[in-house]
Amino acid sequence: MRVSVDRDRCCSSGMCVTNVPEVFDQDDQDSLVRLRRTTFRPEEFDELRLAAQLCPGGAITVTEDRPTGTAEAGGPAD
């Protein structure tokens, strides 16, 4: 999972910090979102998705990593 933040879209509501303070923080100067870290544990994934959904400015993007070694849907059967 990858998480990115767009500080230009951030409206400084702090919803992300309230929901996942171990991952998100707000800058001291302008209160815009910033990431505390860029690696995440699987048990945090649901909270990260929720933070992105609750962000009123749409400043948080969560990108799901595709599992390796999986067949494409509709591909040839073994």
Image: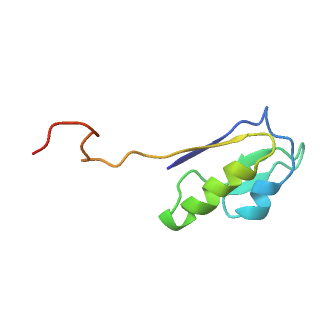
Residue sitting farthest toward the top = 8
Q: Is there any visible trace of residue 35 in the rendered image? A: no
Position of 49 with respect to 8 (left or right) is left
Q: Residue at x 73, y 40 (%)?
A: 59
> In the current view of this chain or complex, which residue is farthest to the left?
78
Farthest bottom residue in view: 43
User: Is residue 64 visible to the viewer in this orientation of the structure?
Assistant: yes
Work out whether 39 lies above or below 5: below
State the image quarter where residue 20 is shown: bottom right
Residue 21 spot, x, y in % from top left: 73, 63
Depicted 24 relative to depicted 66: above or below: below
> Which residue is nearer to you in this view: 2 or 39?
2
**Could you say which quadrant of the image residue 25 lies in?**
bottom right
Quarter of the rendering containing residue 4? top right
In-image side of 8 versus 78 (left or right): right
Instruction: Decide which of 22, 28 is in the foreground and name it.
Output: 22
Give percent across and percent down for residue 58: 74, 40
Residue at (15% x, 37% y) in the render: 76
Whole-percent x, y for residue 54 in the image: 75, 52
Instruction: Indicate how the structure is coloured in the image.
Output: rainbow
What residue is drawn where x is 9% and y is 45%?
78
**Residue farthest to the right, as pictured:** 29
Above-or-below relation of 49 to 7: below
Image point (61%, 54%), residue name: 49
